[in-house]
């Protein structure tokens, strides 16, 4: 074993290594906290001054991460900064940066590449760089490796490069950063060894794979699997609706099969930073090889069409009440992309609100996780969350359940609303008042 390799593994095992996490968002912050509670000195890097201020004051900006977790991490020496100079002092730099799509639905690696470029002047011999952002197979090898080697460092000898995808499921109480098994691929055998030493101290089960590309594609497969199955069940919902069959009852019945069936639940489309985005990293990469991935494209078409289908159901439901969308007061319940979280990235609820607004409805929303919805570049709403009370519910011609947060009082909603369009199957007894969509 080379002395550099031996030194870093000894530092990791003795927990004297300093761990840096670049990107303190939905994935980076819980990871930083996990390393900190395991006994490492942790430095968080972010360019968002609002987030940095929150952390420095011990305040969380993520609904399922408590202030006390951040305060305990600070007590253990956790610091958050935008000062890249600190990178010189780090033994490991873990990148948890956004990987969105650009306007043409191609991978936008700007955040990852810009961050690596800004780290370069401060990188030194003996460091670990681990990319956790979701991306297409080949990214770490083609985009990170040559950049870092341009400093005259050789991978596997002078520095250690890893790809280990983030699998965080925000708001899921059954799993934690520690208990979610972690896939890990290294640029060389020595890199993999270092990767396993890094994560082995904080994650219960590691899954080493033979290359970074396998790790990159494994993450995409997980999300493609979800995207395609969500598309399938949304399509089946539309067909079942025409057949006058309750799709939720169908799924519940099918779910009793103890093997070979995985239930997916229909909804108003798809949302979040991952499922509507990541599969298209794969389709984009596949094009380079002259092949297409039709399941993904089809799932995209179906899931993207769902908000229109829901709005059509709202229109029909209002017509049955002798009302038109134009001029109606419509309350959308839940605008986060999924229940019990405060993340509204790519939320289909926003598309539903925009479509209803374009048809002339007076749109309002209620979401205990999102108190205000101010105007920004992607929409022109400027709203605050409406409190669910009997009086407030009576004002609206229609209530659309877009995201079924547990906090909502569904009995009260049913009692005082004049019309409910339920996109989540929250109500089983349908009537003139409760319509499934
Ligand atoms: N959110 C999830 O549930 C989830 C789950 C699994 C995987 N992922 C993947 O993890 C990656 C990160 O996603 P996220 O949801 O944590 O994103 P996020 O937007 O919540 O957090 C990213 C953070 O990176 C910061 N950042 C941007 N440029 C930076 C720079 N140059 N230096 C330092 N910080 C910088 C941003 O300010 C932000 O705080 C993505 O690839 C995503 O696909 C996300």
Image (spheres, rainbow, N blue to C red):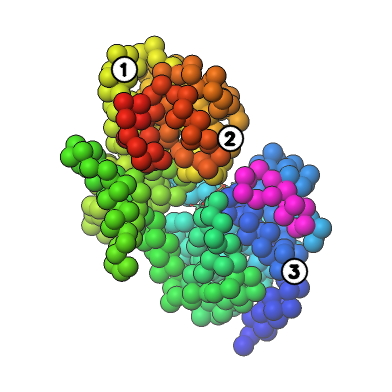
Picture residue at 22% right of the left edge, 42% below the top? 245
Q: Nearer the viewer, mark 1 or mark 3?
A: 1
Q: Quadrant of residue 53?
A: top right
Give the structural element (helix, strand or loop) at label 2: loop
Picture residue at 72% right of the left edge, 63% below the top? 36
Give the structural element (helix, strand or loop) at label 3: loop
Q: Is residue 395 above or below residue 253?
A: above
Q: Nearer the viewer, mark 3 or mark 2?
A: 2
* Residue 104 on image: x %, y %: 36, 39
How far apart in space, not on screen, are marks 1 and 3 (Cα)?
62 Å
Give the structural element (helix, strand or loop) at label 1: loop
Q: Earlier in the sequence, mark 3 or mark 2?
A: 3
Q: Which mark is residue 321?
A: 1
Q: Nearer the viewer, mark 2 or mark 1?
A: 1
Q: Is residue 186 left or right of residue 178?
A: left
Q: Nearer the viewer, residue 196 or 124?
A: 196
Question: Which residue position holds label 3?
Answer: 39
Q: Which mark is residue 149?
A: none
Picture residue at 47% right of the left edge, 56% below the top? 134
């Amino acid at each position: 074993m080379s002395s550099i390799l031996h030194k870093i593994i000894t530092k990791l095992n003795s927990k004297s290594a300093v761990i840096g996490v670049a990107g303190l968002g939905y994935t980076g912050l819980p990871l930083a906290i996990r390393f900190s509670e395991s006994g490492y000195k942790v430095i968080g890097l972010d360019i968002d001054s609002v987030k940095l201020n929150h952390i420095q004051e011990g305040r969380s900006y993520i609904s399922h991460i408590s202030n006390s977790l951040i305060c305990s991490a600070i007590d253990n020496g956790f610091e958050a900064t935008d000062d890249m100079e600190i990178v010189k002092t780090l033994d490991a730099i873990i990148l948890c940066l956004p990987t969105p799509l650009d306007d043409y639905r191609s991978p936008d690696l700007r955040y990852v590449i810009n961050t690596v470029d800004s780290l370069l002047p401060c990188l030194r011999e003996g460091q670990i760089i681990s990319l956790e952002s979701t991306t297409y197979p080949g990214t770490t090898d083609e985009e990170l490796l040559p950049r870092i080697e341009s400093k005259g460092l050789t991978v596997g000898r002078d520095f250690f490069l890893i790809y280990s995808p983030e699998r965080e499921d925000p708001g899921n109480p059954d799993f934690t950063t520690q208990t979610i098994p972690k896939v890990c691929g290294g640029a060389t055998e020595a890199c993999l060894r270092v990767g396993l030493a890094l994560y082995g101290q904080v994650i219960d089960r590691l899954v080493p794979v033979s290359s970074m590309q396998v790790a990159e594609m494994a993450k995409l497969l997980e999300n493609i699997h979800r995207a395609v199955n969500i598309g399938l069940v949304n399509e089946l919902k539309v067909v079942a609706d025409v057949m006058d069959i309750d799709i939720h009852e169908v799924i519940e019945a099918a779910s009793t099969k103890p093997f070979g069936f995985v239930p997916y639940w229909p909804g108003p489309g798809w949302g979040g930073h991952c499922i509507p985005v990541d599969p298209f990293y794969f389709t984009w990469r596949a094009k380079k090889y002259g092949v297409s991935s039709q399941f993904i494209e089809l799932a995209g078409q179906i899931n993207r069409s769902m908000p229109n289908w829901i709005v059509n159901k709202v229109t029909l439901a209002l017509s049955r009440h002798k009302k038109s969308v134009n001029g109606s007061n419509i309350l959308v319940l839940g605008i986060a992309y999924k229940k019990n979280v405060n993340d509204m990235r790519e939320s289909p609820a926003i598309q539903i609100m925009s479509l209803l607004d374009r048809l002339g409805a007076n749109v309002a929303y209620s979401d205990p996780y999102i108190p205000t919805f101010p105007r920004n570049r992607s929409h022109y709403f400027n709203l605050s969350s409406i409190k669910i009370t009997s009086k407030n519910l009576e004002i609206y011609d229609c209530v659309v359940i877009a995201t079924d947060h547990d906090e909502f009082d569904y009995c009260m909603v049913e009692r005082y609303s004049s019309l409910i369009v339920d996109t989540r199957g929250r109500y089983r007894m349908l009537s003139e008042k409760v319509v499934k969509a």
